[in-house]
Amino acid sequence: MTMPHPGDLFPALNFKLANGETLDLPDALAGGYGVVLFFRGAWCPYCNAQLRAFQRAGERLAAVGARVVAVSVDDEATTSALIAKHSLEFPVAHSANADAVADAVGAFINEEPRYIQSTGFVLDPAGRVLVSVYSSGAIGRLVPEDVIGLISYLRDRAVADK
């Protein structure tokens, strides 16, 4: 199991999207800040709240140059229903292999049923990890306000350093 540290390049991973396309990380987020959310599944009320919060913050995230993707072990039909239920406009991938994700990013895994515990990353425009948030249970996850604040701070600091 690998746990990417700040400054490490996010590992190359690919996932299936409900529209039949493939989500290639970190390439899909290249050139802007990225938020990668691994979530427990559509059944989890905390995950639903997190996804809705990132959807509501979409304009503010775009204003700081951030894009969001989410990934779970849910099947395609469940993922499609979740996207429709919350009108999610960011890519949501399905059918992730929990063990492969744990090996690549160090996420905690629930044994039975098998799913990925909430794990989130903020990536810089080059695909390097800025922040990682690991949860071993239902609570403890990235929130949009923290992501927006971090990116705003980094962008302001970069301007001030010039």
Image: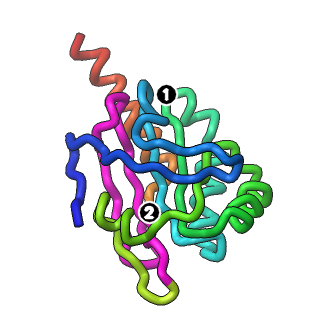
Percent from the top left, x then y, of residue 133?
Answer: 35, 59
Mark 2 is surrounded, within 10 Å at the Cα level, by few (under 14), some (14 to 19) or many (20 or more) other residues, namely many
Depth check: give the residue in front, 89 or 79.
79
Residue 9, numbered label = none
Placement of 96 over or under 149, stated as above or below: below
As drawn, 136 above or below 60 = below
User: For mark 1, what is the residue?
Assistant: 65
- Percent of width and height locating residue 98: 43, 70
In which image quadrant can residue 162 be found?
Answer: top left
Q: Left or right of 100: which side holds 58?
A: right
Structural crowding at the residue carrying mark 1, measured as other residues with C-alpha within 10 Å and reported as few (<14), some (14–19) or many (≥20): some
Residue 45 locus on image (x, y percent): 63, 73
Q: Which mark is residue 141?
A: 2
Q: Residue at x 68, y 53 (%)?
A: 18
| Closer to the camera in the image, 51 or 31 | 31
What's the amino acid at mark 1? Gly
| Picture coordinates of residue 13, whole percent (x, y) | 40, 50
- The magenta region covers 114-140
**What is the CA distance from the residue labelled 1 to the residue labelled 2?**
21 Å
Q: Secondary structure at mark 2?
A: loop
Whether residue 115 appears in magenta in the rendering, the answer is yes
